[in-house]
Structures are given as C-alpha cells and as structure tokens.
Amino acid sequence: MFRSRNYHNSFGRNSNNTWHELPEKIKDELKKIVEERDGLVCSQKYGHGCGTTGYLTMDHIIPIRGGGPVADIGNLQLLCVKCHDKKTMKVDVMYTSIYQRRGH
C-alpha cells in the first residue's frame, strides 16, 4: 500500500511554489513513492507515456500553472524525456490558446 503524502502546509494546490523550490528531502520522498507506484516505467496511466524504462523524469499531470498541486503524489507521474517533452508542448499550446482567447 502506498502512503498518500500531500504537503499542503507550505506547498499546496494554490501555491506559487515550483518543484525546484521544494526541499530535497521532500522531493526525494515523493520520487521514491511515485517510482514504487509506477514501477520505474514511463507512465501510461493517463495516456501520456510509452512504457519505456529509459531515462525518467517527474511530471505534474495537471501543470502547476494550471492549478495542479506541486507536491501531491496523485498529481505526479514518471515520464521519459521524449514523452515529457511531447506532453509539455501540447500543454504549452493549450495554455497559449487560452491566454490569447482572453485577449492578452
């Protein structure tokens, strides 16, 4: 059974903090939990991954800038660099489109 860990005291859903600002101890614990849960493969849970076991990186399923929590294991998945870049490009296009529709 995986521990449900959510650091909402200082790094919650409405936080402006980023993954890189989290203390290393918290990042290491979150990485370990997600690695155990996802089995060290590029996550296919949400249709973002390819299943490879190559170089993996942490990904926020719902981007932080989209309101996703920074340090919630339910919002983290492992993706290979190729799938992460592909997903990030799609998300960037989506947010650019929304931003432009708002007249900015």
Image (cartoon, rainbow, N blue to C red):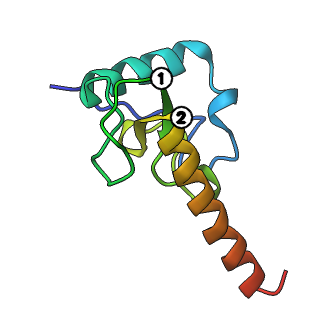
Name the residue tied to disc 1: 55
Name the residue tied to disc 2: 81
Percent of width and height locating residue 90: 57, 62
Percent of width and height locating residue 69: 51, 47
Kind of element beneath mark 2 = helix
Percent of width and height locating residue 85: 58, 45
**Label 1, label 2: how many angstroms apart (C-alpha)?**
7 Å
Return the residue found at the far left. Answer: 1
Quarter of the image with the C terminus in it: bottom right
- Is residue 41 in view? yes
Q: Is residue 85 left or right of residue 48?
A: right
Q: Residue at x 32, y 23 (%)?
A: 40
Q: Nearest the camera: 11 or 85?
A: 85
Q: Mark 1 Cα within 10 Å, few/some/many (few <14, many 20+)? A: few
Label ID, residue 98: none
Percent of width and height locating residue 99: 74, 76
Kind of element beneath mark 1 = loop
Return the residue found at the far right. Answer: 104
Q: Residue at x 65, y 67 (%)?
A: 93
Relative vertical location of residue 46 with respect to residue 56 in this rendering, above or below: below
Q: Residue at x 65, y 56 (%)?
A: 65
Q: Is residue 17 left or right of residue 47?
A: right
In primary-sequence order, the first of circles 1 and 2 is 1
Specify the amino acid type for callout 2. Val
- Is residue 3 in view? no
Query: Mark 1–mark 2 contact, CB under 8 Å?
Result: yes
Specify the amino acid type for callout 1. Tyr
